[in-house]
């Protein structure tokens, strides 16, 4: 009798899951982007939004909820109902902020159901043309052994900040991050020479490199970028193993039904692989990934541990 009851219960649950997957979404889905509009994360979200809305016959509404390096919007999704109608499009700060902030308001492993990494982009190290004689990462290291070197970043906990802190810990030199409220003001500061070195997101920086207003030194990706083939990676510049991804990933609150997570995953893969979406993302120098929820979960665990070590070694903290 117990065996029969367990079998009946299992069949009921499987049937319920199938119904959920078939009916989801039955109303608009809110995608929270924990950064201001206009940045790379917002671009990825809008590529997904327009195409998923068409696929589902339901609107996907983008909510830009910036603040505290992405913590405010991320924490809001962690507390949202786990029904698939509030999801998150975030970046690598998901894994580093809990170490940087005394209370980020969420835990990257415990509070979310990973869906997929849509793609990665690199960080580029650039300098103002007036910072003469600094053309390689070795030059930056040598300069930082003589004097403190400031570097501009688009914000605390973002990939540019993390790349600078990782370089600092690997070389044990004196460097100080100067965070700005987004990519635009950070780039403006380097263009004006207020901060002569920057660790920046590639999409918003490449036009200034190509125009000659900024000088590219290296990229943090494991291989050179097609858009800047002559710019070496940090790893090949004498720092083996150096890699910092600017990840763009989709997550749902913990407890979201697995069937909904799987449907989100499958539909995102389907729309990102359309020629139009692929072209848009690649034009923004975003390398498409589209891993499984299980692979994304493993990535979150490993990156959270990695950045906890880097933050501890660098002493970087946000009060």
Image: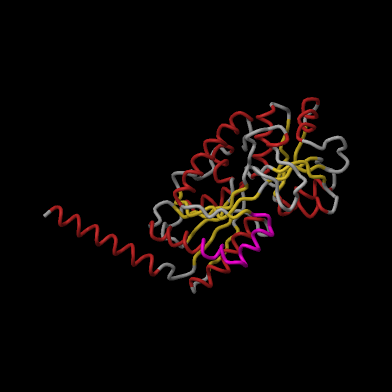
Q: Which of these two is toward me, 255 or 181?
A: 255
Q: Quadrant of the C terminus?
A: top right
Percent across and percent down for residue 157 are 62, 42
Q: Position of residue 257 (x, y in %)?
A: 38, 57
Q: Residue at x 20, y 57 (%)?
A: 7
**Image label count:** 0
Q: Quadrant of residue 15?
A: bottom left
Q: Residue placed farthest to the left in the image?
A: 1
Q: Is residue 270 magenta?
A: yes
On the image, which quarter does residue 288 sit in? bottom right
Left or right of residue 279, residue 6 in this image: left
Return the x and y of residue 166 as percentages of the image width and height: 65, 34
Residue drawn 67% across and 41% down?
A: 161
x and y percentages locating residue 273 in the rendered image: 56, 63
Image quadrant where one finds the N terminus? bottom left
Q: Is the stretch drawn in magenta largely helix, strand or loop? A: helix
Q: Is residue 170 above or below residue 73?
A: above
Residue nearest the observer in this picture, 214 or 283: 283
Q: Quadrant of residue 25?
A: bottom left
Along the line of sight, the residue nearer the viewer: 33 or 284: 284
Nearest the camera: 271 or 164? 271
Residue 187 is covered by the magenta coloring = no
Q: How is the image coloured?
A: secondary structure
In the image, the segment drawn in magenta is 269-286
The residue that appears at 68% across and 55% down in the rendered structure is: 285
Residue at horizontal 54%, vertical 40%? 303
Q: Is residue 319 above or below residue 273?
A: above
Reply above or below: 60 against 34. below
């Amino acid at each position: 009798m117990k065996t029969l009851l367990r079998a009946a219960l299992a069949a009921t649950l499987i049937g319920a899951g199938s119904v959920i997957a078939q009916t989801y979404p039955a109303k608009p889905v809110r995608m929270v982007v924990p950064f201001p509009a206009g940045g790379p994360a917002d671009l990825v979200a809008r590529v997904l939004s327009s195409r998923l809305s068409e696929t589902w016959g339901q609107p996907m509404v983008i909510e830009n909820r910036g603040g505290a390096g992405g913590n405010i919007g991320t924490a809001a999704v962690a507390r949202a109902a786990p029904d698939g109608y509030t999801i998150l499009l975030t970046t690598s700060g998901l894994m580093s902020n809990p170490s940087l902030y005394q209370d980020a308001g969420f835990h990257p492993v415990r509070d979310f159901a990973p869906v997929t990494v849509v793609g990665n982009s690199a960080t580029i190290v650039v300098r103002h043309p007036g910072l003469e004689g600094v053309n390689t990462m070795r030059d930056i290291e040598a300069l930082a052994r003589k004097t403190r070197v400031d570097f501009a970043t688009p914000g605390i906990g973002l990939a540019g900040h993390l790349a600078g802190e990782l370089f600092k810990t690997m070389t044990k030199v004196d460097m100080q991050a100067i965070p700005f409220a987004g990519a635009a003001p950070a780039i403006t500061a380097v263009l004006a020479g207020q901060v002569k070195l920057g660790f920046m997101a590639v999409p918003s920086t490449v036009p200034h490199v190509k125009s000659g207003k900024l000088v590219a030194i290296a990229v943090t990706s494991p291989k050179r970028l097609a858009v800047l083939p002559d710019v070496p990676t940090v790893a090949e510049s004498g720092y083996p193993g150096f890699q910092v991804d600017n990840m763009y990933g989709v997550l749902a609150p913990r407890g979201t039904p697995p069937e909904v997570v799987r449907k989100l995953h499958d539909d995102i893969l389907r729309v990102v692989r359309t020629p139009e979406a692929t072209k848009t993302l690649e034009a923004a120098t975003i390398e498409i990934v589209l891993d499984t929820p299980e692979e994304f979960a493993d990535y979150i665990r490993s990156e959270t541990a990695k950045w906890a070590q880097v933050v501890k070694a660098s002493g970087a903290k946000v009060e």
